[in-house]
Image (cartoon, rainbow, N blue to C red):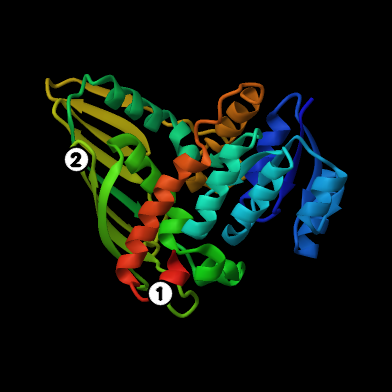
């Protein structure tokens, strides 16, 4: 029976705990958090030992799998510590808060034998899986382009409650790193590898509480000639469904929660997104559990997990390229 530990018991950890509870044959054996109050709550709620230091947990408990749900600037170092000790990892997005840390984690992952998955779980959504199958099949012809939006809302309290989220050093960025990186990942996964990226970021409404951006726009050029355009903001009054509208020679694919495929010959197909109840927020979707279950199902396979650090590095590079165009003299804080 595989054993598991969760490092970082903040907001997103709830979906990892829920997933572990749903998995037959996986045993939670420990939790870890540097915040004594959160740690005490997790210990009481989960009825397992708690640790304030992840290295002590790894030494004393030696779990088979560690779920990393820490602030962004701890992702790479904690994941590398686990992998170097032969412990498998499920790592929350993003891969790292800087490109240098991301590159280091890619190297550690590829020279070791332990598996690692990065939680870009929207690739498991029913609608995006259907889009990927259709686009990969070739039946829709050439992809011409895509338009994407992330129109969400974040209040000052969201950042005041977790101050690391609003800083370059703690989070590595704002909207693009903490919310829209899933959509950036889907753009390059669905439309194709990115050859050029131009754009800018700004702080429109949250400047009193954060130093990172709350709004961004960019244009991506893809291999094969397709172009994607993106607009995202945290200044919206609600968390609207993420939208992806992909145009091909033979159809238009409109993702707005559910997927609608309008074929040039008049046919219309629809794919409904799964709506599994979760302890997390509704805008996180329902695919965390699907990814986590798939990871455990593949533990005995020799091949690396398909959403690997090298795969997750693609979206990190795109985001950092956009940041450097707005902050060309602040490379050390955004790269």
Tell me the quadrant of the picture where the N terminus can be found: top right
Judge whether 335 appears above or below 187 on screen: below
Judge whether 320 appears above or below 298 on screen: below
Q: Which residue is mark 2?
A: 226
Residue 96 visible from this viewpoint: no
Tell me the quadrant of the picture where the C terminus can be found: bottom left
Which residue is more in the foreground, 59 or 136?
59
Which residue is more in the foreground, 81 or 52?
81
- The quadrant in which residue 232 appears is bottom left
Please give the name of the residue rendered at 42% of the width and 77% of the height, measured from the top-left corner: 207
C-alpha distance separating marks 2 and 1? 31 Å
Please give the name of the residue rendered at 73% of the width and 24% of the height, measured from the top-left corner: 24
Labelled pair 2, 1 in contact (Cβ < 8 Å): no
**Position of residue 106 measured from the top left corner of the image (x, y, whole percent):** 53, 45
Number of other residues with Cα within 10 Å of mark 2, as a class: few under 14, some 14 to 19, many 20 or more: many
Q: Secondary structure at mark 2?
A: loop
**Position of residue 43 measured from the top left corner of the image (x, y, whole percent):** 83, 51
Mark 2 vs mark 1, foreground winner is: 1
- The quadrant in which residue 114 appears is top right
Residue 214 visible from this viewpoint: yes
13 to the left or right of 188: right
31 to the left or right of 327: right
Which residue is more in the foreground, 198 or 256?
198
Judge whether 234 appears above or below 181 on screen: below
Farthest bottom residue in view: 208
Please give the name of the residue rendered at 34% of the width and 23% of the height, measured from the top-left corner: 133
Which residue is more in the foreground, 222 or 106?
106
Q: Secondary structure at mark 1?
A: loop
Number of other residues with Cα within 10 Å of mark 1, as a class: few under 14, some 14 to 19, many 20 or more: few
Task: Count numbered badges in the picture.
Answer: 2
Q: Which residue is mark 1?
A: 330
The numbered mark, 2 or 1, whose residue comes first in the sequence reads 2
């Amino acid at each position: 029976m595989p054993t598991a530990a969760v490092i970082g018991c903040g907001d997103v950890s709830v979906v990892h705990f829920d997933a572990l509870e749903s998995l037959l044959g996986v045993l939670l054996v420990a939790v870890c958090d540097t915040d004594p109050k959160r740690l005490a709550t997790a210990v009481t709620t989960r009825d397992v030992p708690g640790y304030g230091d992840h290295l002590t947990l790894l030494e004393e408990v030696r779990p088979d799998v560690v779920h990393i749900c820490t602030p962004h600037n701890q992702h790479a170092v904690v994941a590398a510590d686990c992998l170097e000790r032969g412990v498998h990892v499920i790592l929350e997005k993003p891969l790292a808060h800087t490109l240098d840390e991301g590159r280091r984690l890619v190297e550690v992952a590829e020279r070791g034998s332990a598996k690692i998955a990065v939680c870009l779980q929207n690739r498991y959504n029913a609608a995006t899986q259907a889009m990927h199958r259709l686009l990969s099949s070739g039946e829709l012809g050439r992809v011409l382009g895509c338009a994407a939006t992330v129109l969400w809302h974040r209040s000052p309290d969201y950042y005041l409650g977790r101050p690391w989220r609003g800083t370059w050093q703690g989070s590595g960025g704002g909207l693009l790193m903490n919310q829209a990186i899933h959509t950036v990942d889907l753009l390059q996964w669905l439309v194709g590898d990115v050859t050029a990226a131009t754009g800018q970021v700004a702080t429109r409404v949250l400047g009193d509480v954060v130093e990172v951006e709350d709004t961004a726009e960019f244009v991506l050029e893809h291999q094969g000639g397709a172009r994607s355009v993106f607009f995202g903001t945290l200044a919206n009054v609600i968390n609207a469904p993420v939208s992806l509208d992909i145009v091909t020679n033979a159809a238009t694919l409109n993702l707005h929660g559910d997927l609608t495929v309008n074929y040039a010959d008049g046919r219309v197909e629809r794919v409904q997104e799964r709506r599994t109840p979760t302890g997390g927020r509704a805008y996180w979707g329902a695919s965390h559990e699907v990814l986590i279950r798939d990871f455990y199902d593949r533990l005995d396979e020799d091949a690396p997990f398909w959403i690997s650090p090298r795969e997750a590095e693609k979206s990190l590079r795109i985001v950092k390229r956009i940041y450097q165009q707005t902050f060309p003299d602040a490379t050390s804080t955004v790269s």
